[in-house]
Image (tube, rainbow, N blue to C red):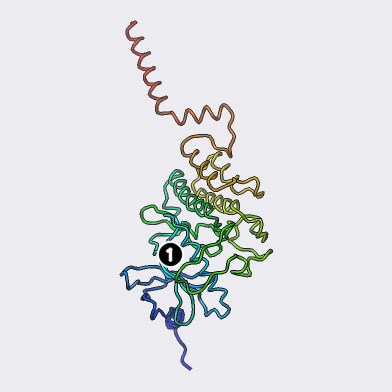
Amino acid sequence: MKWLSDQALDRLRAAVDAPDLSGTGYVLLDKLGAGGMGGVFRVKDTALGRQVALKMIGIVDSSGELSARLLREARIIAQLEHPGIVPVHDVGTLPDGRVFYTMKLVQGRRLDQHRDELGGVPERLRTFQKICDAVSFAHAHNVLHRDLKPQNIMVGQFGEVLVMDWGLAKLLDADIPAQQGAPQQLPRSEEDASKDTAHGVVLGTPGYMAPEQERGEVEAVGPRADVYSLGAVLKFLLDDSGRASKALSAIAGKATAGDAKQRYGSVEELANDVANYLDGLPVSAYPEGPLARLWRWVVKNRAWILLVVAYLVMRAVFILWRRR
């Protein structure tokens, strides 16, 4: 019996894993990664001559459940037209029946890989603000992400930030409308889309999901669950900085409070506190006494204070010299 080498086995796995794109208008280039439902591939759009990312389910789905979930994910993202959310271009079906969708090919690195390349605290907070902006936009359109973490955030070559992987997204009070050209009709509710939304089933990533989410309390998971995850992302950004102030630590602490009622009421409130911190203004998460307010005022206006002090010193020296 002839044994196959590891390299041969890897090539065989890649060949089996590679999607058959015949008749789709796309040409396979390489594989970018794998997720819970399937894989993501770099492909060429032959009609427009550009490279895009193609996401597909990993197995032939006889029940149609995985296909419905993937299509639902694509439909949700397609409704969220925002610079911080990757746009969807197309949906379709492979010759073997597996569903796919294509989206913008993001050039960059995941936040967990890119953090150490960010500068000091201000630059990290500005990156965090961009994340909050995208999530706040989604919330305004009745969509929760439910799996916010550094691995699902991409930072581009020019500082652009994209929130990725909306596979666990939850709709609040609005249905995603039907879209022309979709291979099949999406379920009208999240519970119809997948059985994993039942009470007691945990969806998310440990360390980044809210306690109510970790307990499987589906009905209790709302915008404040994403606030918790963003707070955990903020802590991740500050973990190795060594310069997080008490006010900044209080912001992260309020966002990740165990009791949802003690957190920020919205992502916008969290982002506003971060903006106030960057501008040297008071933050709601950290009540200040008179001395703390005075010190913050001094720090904020230190340039003008130094100029005034320098002028007074020079004036005093001049007066003393005239009297001699």
144 and 32: which is toward the camera: 144
Q: Relative to 45, say whether 108 is above or below.
A: above
Residue 30, how many percent across, how many down? 39, 73
Residue 160 position in % (x across, y down): 40, 53
Q: Relative to 132, does residue 294 appear above or below in the rendering?
A: above
Residue nearer the viewer, 162 or 6 = 162
Residue lying at 36% horizontally and 14% vertically, measured from the top left? 315
Residue 260 relative to residue 20: left or right: right
Residue at the far top: name it: 323
The residue under the point 41% across, 66% down is 89
Residue 99 in the image: state x and y as whole percent: 48, 75
Residue beneath the point at 44% across and 45% down: 120
Residue that extends furthest to the left in the rendered view of this protein = 49
Indicate the secondary structure of the residue bearing disc 1: strand
Residue type, label 1? Val
> Which quadrant of the structure image shows residue 12?
bottom left
Question: Which residue in the protein does label 1 denote?
Answer: 88
Q: Is 41 drawn above or below residue 314 in the view shown?
A: below
Q: In the rendered image, which quarter contains the C terminus?
A: top left
Q: Position of residue 183 (x, y in %)?
A: 48, 74
Please name the residue shown 46% across and 73% down the image: 100
Q: Is residue 259 left or right of residue 164?
A: right
Looking at this view, is 79 or 291 the one in front? 79
